[in-house]
Amino acid sequence: MNALFKALSHPVRRQIIAMLREGPLASGDIAAAFDMSWPTVTGHLNALKEAHLVSTEKHGQSVRYRLEISAVEEGLAFLLALSDTATGKKNDETPDNH
């Protein structure tokens, strides 16, 4: 979980995640969207991969990155649980139960 939030802490990585919401992209297409060196983009992609936010697949010479929604859902569930704890709600409570 720490790797997930660390990966999401950088604005470039969040932008890459937003790009991948539209579908898988080749690493070159991702890199072309940023004004930074290839090794820097690769470092960001590796951080996302280590956090299990993206997966890769080889297509010939190209590497395509795909968003792994399960990791996003896990992080969201954690944040929602924190929110419920902060507001005193239990997971099984709904507004209609009051």
Image (cartoon, rainbow, N blue to C red):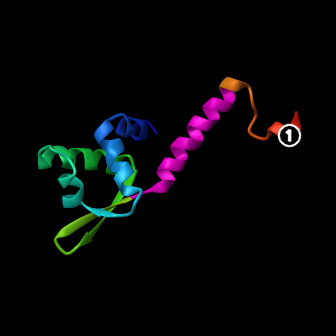
**x, y percent for residue 13:** 32, 43
Q: For the stretch drawn in magenta, what is the main secondary structure?
A: helix
Left or right relative to 32: residue 82: right
The residue stretch that appears in magenta: 67-85
Q: Residue furthest bottom?
A: 60
In the image as oriented, which residue stretches furthest toward the right?
98
Q: Position of residue 3 (x, y in %)?
A: 39, 39
* Three-letter residue code for mark 1: Asp
**Is residue 14 one of those drawn in magenta?**
no
Q: Is residue 30 left or right of residue 92?
A: left
As helix, strand or loop, the secondary structure at mark 1 comes to helix
Q: Tell me residue 28's x, y (percent).
A: 18, 60
Q: Is residue 51 above or below residue 25?
A: above
Against 80, residue 59 (above or below) is below
Does the segment drawn in magenta span residue 83?
A: yes
Q: In this figure, what is the number of numbered marks?
A: 1
Residue at 33%, 45% (x, y): give it.
Answer: 15
Q: Residue at x 23, y 65 (%)?
A: 63
Q: Residue at x 17, y 43 (%)?
A: 40
Rendering coords of residue 91 (x, y %): 74, 39
| Label 1 Cα crowd, 10 Å radius (few <14 / some 14-19 / many 20+) | few
Q: Quadrant of the C terminus?
A: top right
Residue position for label 1: 96
At horizontal 37% and vertical 56% (from top left) the residue drawn is 20
Q: 31 and 47: which one is in front? A: 31
